[in-house]
Every structure is written in C-alpha cells, then in structure tokens.
Amino acid sequence: MIRSARIATAALSSALVLGVLSPAPASAAADFYTPPTNLPAANGALVRTEPMKLAIPVPQGSGSTTLPGSATRIMYKTTDEGGDPAAVSGVYIEPSKPWTGKGARPLISFSVGTQGVGDACAPSKTLESFLVTESGKFMVGYEIPAIYNLLNDGVAMVITDYIGLGTTDRVHTYMNREDQAHAVLDAARAALRLPNTSITSASPIGLYGYSQGGGAAAAAAESAPTYAPELNLKAAYIGGPPANLFEVMKSADNTLLTGVIAWAINAITPYRPELAPHLGNLLNAKGLAYLEKSKDQCIADAILGAGGKKTSEWTNSGNVASVEVKKYPEIMKAVEDQRIGKLTPRIPVQIATGTKDDIVDHGQAKQLALDWCAKGVNVTYKPVIQLASSGGLMLTHLGPMITQLGSSKSWILDRFNGKSASSNCSTARYLP
C-alpha cells in the first residue's frame, strides 16, 4: 500500500513539476478521432494507430528508466448493443519495466471510472496531457495513479475510451452494459494485434476497473465466455460497480453526481426509440432540456449543472426519477436489461465496495457478488468498512479506489502468477 501511494504521489508531483497542466497537445489531432466510413469486419481489428506521448513520466532509480513506458494511440472496431459496428479509441502502453513474474508479460484491459460523456473527457486525452481543456470542457486524468501502479510491475496496459468517448461520431453510451463489455474485451484483442509489443497470445489477461470502470470490467467478465472466448482471461478486479442502475438511480440522486442519471438515460434510449414518448410524459421541459444539454459534459459540467439537485426538478409529477420510472414497465425493462449479474464469468473475480458508498449503492454491489456466487463463480467479496457516508460529496465512493490500489494489484498479480484465488462465497452473505 505504501509503495502504491508513493507511485501515485510521484506521478502527480511530476505533473506539476513538468508543467503538463495545459491543454491537449496538437498531436492529439481531431481527425484521428473521426472514424472512417467503413470499419473492418473483425471485432478488435485495428483501424489506425499513432505514437503518443504520456503526460507524466516518472524517473526510476538513476533516471535511466522512466515509468511508465511507450504509448500508442489506437482506434479499433467493436460491436454495439444494436449489433452495429462502432469505432473506439484508446491507448496501449508498453511498460518500461520488465515483467519478473511467471510466464509471458501479462496484459490488463483497464476500464476507467466516470469521466463524462463529451469527447474531451476521453482517457486517451488525459493520459496525454493530464489536464484537458478542450471546447470549454475540463477534465483531469485522475486514473493515472492506478494505471501507473500496474505498469510499475511490468504489466502491459490497454485503456479503452469506450464507445463514443473520444470518437466524434456518436454520444458515449455511459453505463450501457453491452457497449462497455464489448469495448473492454475488444481493446484486449486490439492490443494483441499491435505490432512490436512484448505481449503474445500466451500473455495472461486481466480486467480492472473502479466505479463506471468496475461496471465495465464486471460486464466484460460475464460477457467474455460468449463474446470473446479465445482471450486468455485470468481474473477481474471490480471496484464499486454500478451493477443495478435502478438502485444507483436512487443512491446518486441529490448528490454531486446527480447528472450521471441523465447520462445513463441517454445511453439506453438510442437502442430503444420506443421509449421517447414515455420520457416525454415523465419529464418536464426542464428535464428534457437537461437530457439534451448533458450529452457533451465532463464531470465538472455535471457537477456545475446538476450537483446537489434532485431529479424531482426534472419530472412532471415532482417525484424523483426512481419513483416515476416504476410507473413505466417499458422503461423499467430497459433499466433491468442493463443489470450485471445475470451471466456467468469463468474467471476469479474480486468485488470491492465501500460499505457507506454515497454514490454507488453498496447493497447492489454486494448483491452482484451474491448473484455470481449462486452461479458458482469464484468470488472474493471485499467490503471496505466505512463508518459514515460523506453525504453525496463522493468521498466515500472515491475512497476505496485509492485505499485498495495496493491490495487490488497484489490480488490480480497473484492470478497472473498462477496462484489460486480463495472464494469467500460461503460467508459473503454474512459480511457487511
């Protein structure tokens, strides 16, 4: 844990010293993020690549080695929930550190936590400049410490931007179960196709994410047996997962991140145009206007636009959204379609969740562990004990993302090194 904290501190300190708190450099050309008209047929096929500089180099030892390594911006093909091809951007990072564990160098397909839905919020852009101020948007690469923490042990990393986050052709489908699962798995396929890397078909692959990223990693873990059975997956670390969007709709309301509820609605409706009349009845003019406005937001925009507000301001009835959507079976079915836990991962998973998480309801994260336990999955359920909620300020949500950096890395590295994971399904229901 101490070592992980030092890496995080070094990364952020280097950002300040090197003066990378500046807009994204010109090399992040807009045309890279504009997909071509025709995409390859194969999922995970590379569309285009280019070298990319990383914002925060951290000298190691004498300074002859710099963490994290060399980066390649990528665009690859995936398939969306509607069965249509989609282009996704992202980053592959070849570590400067050697892999000293067993076997081939491992690869992690890393799924980031909530960035926003505007193209400026793409993690490939914040990895390049740490702070992005593009088109009036503001975003900080807060996931960099977690990514560098894994690179420090010689693990190759591929980070997806998700569908529509970065690419200019569509709106990001925030928390859409299938879209995120496919983007994460196809990022791993794309990384394996890149030339001149040290990963091979023998490389063990892990999934890792927290918050939105935890939901994406969880969806990928349970989708892999049918969507990407050829991948050499070994484990998935799943932190603070929004596995049940209806429960998260309740817990996120009247918090700094009330705005994410609008993002999730905008991610479901493109595939279900029949919901438009129901939303028109449910939402008032203010609510409908905010749905449209929210389609190009980063986190800061959402906090400024809806932070601390109740969704009751958006409904015709004056009830909060979680009360209103229950009146519409079609909307409830669409939300239920996004629930994670109905399929069965074939790899060990660790699920970590803060017991007083003030944004992503703890109970539904524990329920994901119990659902998978009931299916015979090797689950390590890890409740992170918290004494009190931070009341919608996100502190108890974000806390475990930081405090679990060391233990989550150790757990997934053990899987890469062939150590078996001990499930605690027999006692999980009795834990907080």
Image (tube, grey):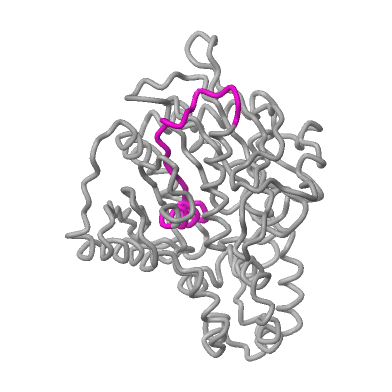
Q: From this viewpoint, is residue 277 visible?
A: yes
Judge whether 60 appears above or below 39 on screen: above
The answer to whether residue 388 is seen in the rendering is no
| Left or right: 6, with 117 as reference point | left
| Image coordinates for residue 201, horizontal then vertical, percent | 45, 32
Task: Give the magenta range.
Answer: 194-222
Viewer-nearest residue: 148 or 27: 27
Residue 271 in the magenta stretch? The answer is no
Could you tell whether 153 is left or right of 380 in the image? right
Looking at the rendered structure, the number of numbered marks drawn on it comes to: 0
Image-quadrant location for residue 50: top right
Please indicate whether residue 377 sits to the left or right of residue 312 in the image.
left
Please state which of residues 40 and 400 is positioned toward the viewer in this rendering: 40
Q: Where does the N terminus fall, quadrant-wise?
A: top left
Compared to residue 314, the image places residue 164 above or below, namely above
- Residue 183, given in percent of the width and then of the height, sits at 57, 50
Q: Is residue 316 left or right of residue 239?
A: right
**Image point (70%, 33%), residue name:** 49
x then y, percent, for residue 156 = 49, 30
In which quadrant is the C terminus drawn?
bottom left
Query: Residue at the front extreme?
Result: 41
Q: Position of residue 196 (x, y in %)?
A: 59, 22
* Residue 140 in which image quadrant: top right
Most distant residue in the left direction: 426
**Which residue does the image show at 55% across and 55% down from the upper left?**
180
Q: Is residue 203 magenta?
A: yes
